[in-house]
Image: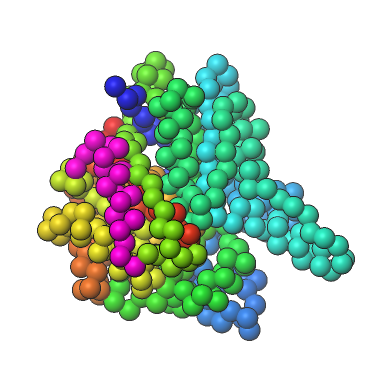
Amino acid sequence: MTARVLVTGVGLISPLGHSARGYWESLLYRESLPQEHPTLPPALLPNQRYYGIADDEPAEETARAESRATRLAVKATGMALDDAGLIPADLSRTTVGVCFGTGMGESDRLEISHTEAALRGDAPSSFFLSRIAARLAETYGFTGANTTLSTACSAGSYAMALAHERIVSGEAEVMVAGGSEIYSRVGQGCFHRLGALDPVACRPFDVDRKGTVFGEGVAALILESEEHARRRGRRRVLAQFEGAGWSCDGYHTTAPEPTGRWIEAAMLRALSAAGVTPQDIDCVLPHGTGTSLNDLVESQALARVFGDRVRDLKVSAIKGKLGHSGGSAGAVACATAAMILERGVVPPTGNVNVVDAECGLPIRVDAPTPASIRHVLVNAYAFGGNNISVVLGRG
């Protein structure tokens, strides 16, 4: 019998709040619109907006010492440990690993380095994505397997799946899993060149959607073997991480494979790994970026997986209020799924006026929906066709 892996704590820092509770309340009840970045060159990228995390520290001065992506990951991990009732000093005899996803990594430090090197006429310094997870281990004394990975916008979900595997295999008893993404001028510029940015807001599955909008976001989740949680007397459990399914389009650098057959495969593999059927899923957190083709392909794949039952699903596209937090988006969605399961409420989707009839998803936009949720399916897709779906269930 496969060991049960529980989600026992969550830490979140997002445009909606600097705590899991603040995030949740804002996700349920607050409107959210993107802002213009204070350092964005207007002549270069007119009307391009993002969803940012309010930060009192001077960004450039702080980044010289440590990237905001890493600093915020350290804070979120501290919140998650506290939420799980875990004290780092008490974990000295426990194998605790780290697996964190990111898209652009320590982009602020990298951009400063390149700018200063260009002014001096030198070669830029090198930075490694692995610093984020390494810094978490250094800060909290974790000695288990330590990985920072980047599969672009699906990295956070891949981090969750790999953390789950390490517990099931016996490599660790506790894993800190999540994702961290901050504003990147390079990322913003690339999406601008692709014509994939919405000048108004992130409007997933809306008939007038015109692209995505970037958002900063950091999520840390504590994954723990049921045996370890029981041994320390932990009673509060948010959710159970039940399974994941991976696939790769192998189709195009940036565009999804138009039939959606490989994202459908990822969903079916996740359901199989979790030991559930489409009839067992009550809620779906889609990838839902607001780009025209991605939203349509995903909705068609959902219709094939769930058939007529797709109309009965509770669908919440959280990027409508958060923006697209790149490599951390999947981890933020998994944290949201855990809170949905624990609290029995499904958040509404923000910034959607009219759901595209061609997508045909039952998206509620006006208010939270109380519901008894047994299992949640979370989707995340990325450049290069890096697809993953995960299933979380009641703890």
Q: In which quarter of the image is the N terminus?
A: top left
Query: What residue range appears in magenta?
Result: 258-277
Q: Where is residue 34 in the image (x, y as percent from the top left)?
A: 47, 69
Residue nearer the viewer, 14 or 316? 316
Q: In which quarter of the image is the C terminus?
A: top left
Depicted 137 relative to depicted 319: above or below: above
Residue lying furthest left:
308
Residue lying furthest bottom:
43
Depicted 394 relative to depicted 184: above or below: above
Q: Is residue 121 left or right of residue 106?
A: right
Residue drawn at (77%, 66%) of the image: 115
Residue nearer the viewer, 190 or 115? 190
Residue drawn at (57%, 38%) of the image: 147
Residue drawn at (34%, 24%) of the image: 3
Q: Position of residue 276 (x, y in %)?
A: 21, 39
Residue drawn at (28%, 37%) of the image: 274
Q: Quadrant of residue 256?
A: bottom left
**Residue 267: within the magenta?**
yes
Q: In which quarter of the image is residue 392?
A: top left
